Image (cartoon, grey):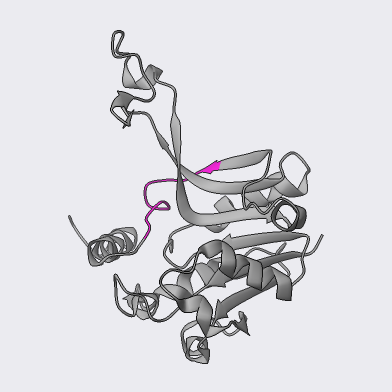
Amino acid sequence: MKIVAFVPIKLNSVRLPNKNLLPLAGEPLCWHICNTLLQIKEIKDCYVYCSDEKVLDYIPNEVRFLKRNATLDGDLVKGFDIYTAFIKEVMADVYVLAHTTSPFVLPDTIRNSLHRILDGSHDSAFTAKKVQSFVWYKGSPLNYDINDVPRTQDMEAIYVETSGFYMFKQEIFTKHRRRIGFKPYIQEVSDTEAIDIDTQDEFDKAIFYSKLTRGETNE
């Protein structure tokens, strides 16, 4: 099966200006997930999908650049439209959609999910954070009986999607117009892998975790 990874990138981020180019652990933010994807031998090609060739100065040399229409950089453009445009240009049996804002996703996490699709047990996969806490939705408890409050360890877990990655077979997207199929594998990730950077506070948190991992802080 042909497996292709792609990382949509725009350089004109609004909430955190120049977000994808900011330095993290000695490399630009957008470099990290690309470098991780290159370590997965099952992935035939890894693409950066961006309207600006300037991004080539900030990603590993082995990553392929595919220029997208600048209209896809609009603030109101949905991710689905970007994915559709890419998939029309690059054919594959399985797509791995990853995001620069999740720089701490581990290669083994990607491999584990990919193998669940390749062995036929699942048609898609996505990263999620497991939550066992008291959750409310629209004014009511979502995952527990307010008249019989359980211990948190006995509660039914809720899984919150993260921006780490989505994997799906080609027909899931082209035929059913979904990035999550009918038999998805939920890839649980750690707190660090679940970090999603869109604001300055989140980027500062990522810097702290990066230093902590490398033993550069005593905090």
Of 50 and 72, which appears nearest the observer?
72
Kindly indicate the quadrant of the structure image that contains residue 67: bottom right
Left or right relative to 80: residue 13: left
The residue positioned farthest toward the right in the image shown: 1
Q: Position of residue 194 (x, y in %)?
A: 41, 51
Q: Residue at x 28, y 61 (%)?
A: 202
Q: Is residue 195 magenta?
A: yes
Is residue 98 visible from the viewing direction of this image? Answer: no
Q: Residue at x 72, y 47 (%)?
A: 117
Q: Which residues are magenta?
A: 187-196
As displayed, is residue 86 above or below residue 189? below
Of 111 and 217, which appears nearest the observer?
111
Query: Total of numbered circles in the picture?
Result: 0
Left or right relative to 140: residue 73: right
The quarter of the picture where the C terminus appears is: bottom left
Q: Position of residue 43 (x, y in %)?
A: 70, 65
Q: Is residue 90 magenta?
A: no
The residue positioned farthest toward the left in the image shown: 219
Of 173 and 49, which appears nearest the observer?
173
Q: Position of residue 212 (x, y in %)?
A: 28, 59
Q: Residue at x 52, y 81 (%)?
A: 71
As displayed, is residue 66 above or below residue 198? below
The quarter of the picture where the N terminus appears is: bottom right
Of 78 and 106, which appears nearest the observer?
78
As displayed, is residue 206 above or below residue 85? above
